[in-house]
Amino acid sequence: QPRQRVGSGSGSHAGATEEDLVHDRVVGVLGGGQLGRMLALEAARMGIQIRFLDPTENAPAAVAAEQLVGSFQDRDKILEFAQGCDVVTVEIEHVNTAALEEVQSELGVSVHPSPETLRIIQDKFAQKQHLMQHGIPVVQCMEINDLSDLHNACAKGYPVMLKARRLAYDGRGNYIIGGASQLDEAVGALGGFEAGLYAEQWVPFAKELAVMVARTRDGRVLPFPVVETIHRESICFVTEAPADVPREVADEARDVAERAVGCLDGAGVFGVELFWVASGGVIVNEIAPRPHNSGHYTMDGCRTSQFEQHLRAVLGWQLGDPGMGAGCAVMYNLLGEAEGEEGLARARRALATARGLPGAVAHWYGKEGITKRRKIGHINIVGESREAVREQLATLDQLAANALQ
Ligand code: ATP
Ligand code: MG
Ligand code: MG
């Protein structure tokens, strides 16, 4: 598949499409969590109408968009929901893709990214196979259907990463097998063989990187800067942009990410999670077919946010300039430390302390139920130098940790 970079929106209007000139667009979004909320807030600013489908009443996105209460697995709800939308997109990939195919064929409403892309990505093992078939470097992995498969997967030694193929997020579908005595426990923890499992070789990465890549309806790609992601207990915790890696590593990361998104179909932004293996280059961990945590820094660090870019892409508008408006931007995730009211009070305190830091912008997700390790907001810090921003981040980490305790 030939890969073509897009020119971005800054400068002349030569790139404007016919779609650019149409107003009053209605975008339907499956899912109304924090990603849907940030999409809705950006859409409101841009003069785009959003409606979303989510099973939880008064979901975070309801702050700036109209909600239909219902499941994004429910075929009838999805078809009802899509009536009158100009385009349907997602903020979560675990949706009914057969229903989305009907939205296209029966209602004539376009869906971006394509239902087929969503189907491939939903199943993390199918996703890896798809990437491999297209020559994208990924870790060695194998399907696990019974104990003998698992023994084979562990034959070369430990640790081995056992993963659920479906419905995984924030590391909740992963189990690190440290030795032969943990096989049963690992399988049980992930819901048994019948849940659908696969195993990955352990990757001794030097750093985790990520690239948000926008893709137009006609398949051209435009990447945001390469960032480093730092995880705590498998949850993205901090990102730093641009990534502090040698130039050739950043170039390779961008190239791998562009090629990975190039072999998927449909428009939108995609979050490409990568491992930099110092001895063996850059490989893809997984892809999200939507705005992604590793792209939250763009809200304050780039000339166009990932949410605006996603809306532009799915609507067929020309893309915005993904370049950074400052020297360095870090994002710090606020995670719940306690349940219920107490958790909420602590999170609010953490957000309030962050506001006092120069260069810090606090983002609140408006979730009603706070639980431990749940994402409840994030703080972006933007500044001219990496050193200055890191210093602010260290202060923030201290303040937030105290507030959350
Ligand atoms: P997300 O919330 O990003 O969708 P997820 O639940 O799909 O997360 P993964 O991205 O598969 O989980 O893994 C979570 C984290 O676990 C990775 O970011 C990385 O830190 C670690 N990890 C995953 N796979 C491997 C591996 N094969 N070797 C080493 N570490 C790994
Ligand atoms: Mg994932
Ligand atoms: Mg991941």
Image (spheres, grey):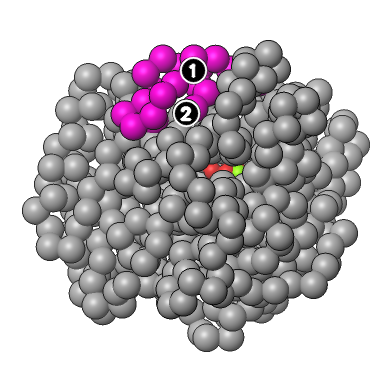
Q: Nearer the viewer, residue 300 or 283?
A: 300
* Neighbour tally class for label 1: few under 14, some 14-19, many 20 plus, Cα within 10 Å: many
Residue in view at x 45 percent, y 34 percent: 50
x%, y% of residue 354? Answer: 16, 50
- Give 243 or 299, whichever is nearer the viewer: 299
Residue 312, visible in the rendered structure: yes
Query: Is 210 situated left or right of 252 in this image?
Result: left
Quadrant where the N terminus is found in the figure: bottom right
Q: Nearer the viewer, residue 323 or 394?
A: 323
Q: Looking at the image, which residue sits at the far bottom? A: 247
| Disc 2: residue Cβ within 8 A of ligand 1's nearest atom | no
Tell me the kind of residue under disc 1: Leu
Side of 15 where 66 appears, left or right: left
For the C terminus, the quadrant is: top left
Marks 1 and 2, Cα distance to the nearest angstrom? 8 Å
Q: Which circle marks residue 45 in the picture?
A: none
The residue at 40%/69% (across/down) is 241
In the figure, 162 relative to 319: above or below? Answer: above
Q: Along the polypeptide, which appears first: circle 1 or circle 2?
A: 2
Residue 173 in sight from this viewpoint: no
Q: Quadrant of residue 357?
A: bottom left
Badge 2 element: strand
Q: Which residue is mark 2?
A: 51
Q: Residue at x 35, y 41 (%)?
A: 44
> Is residue 255 positioned above or below 174 on the image?
below
Determine the secondary structure under disc 1. Answer: strand
Q: Please give the residue where the numbered disc 1 appears in the rendered image.
A: 68
Q: Position of residue 305 (x, y in %)?
A: 40, 57
Query: Residues at badges 1 and 2 in contact (C-beta under 8 Å)?
Result: yes
Q: Amino acid at mark 2?
A: Arg
- Let me know if residue 284 is in the magenta part: no
- Extent of the magenta region: 52-73
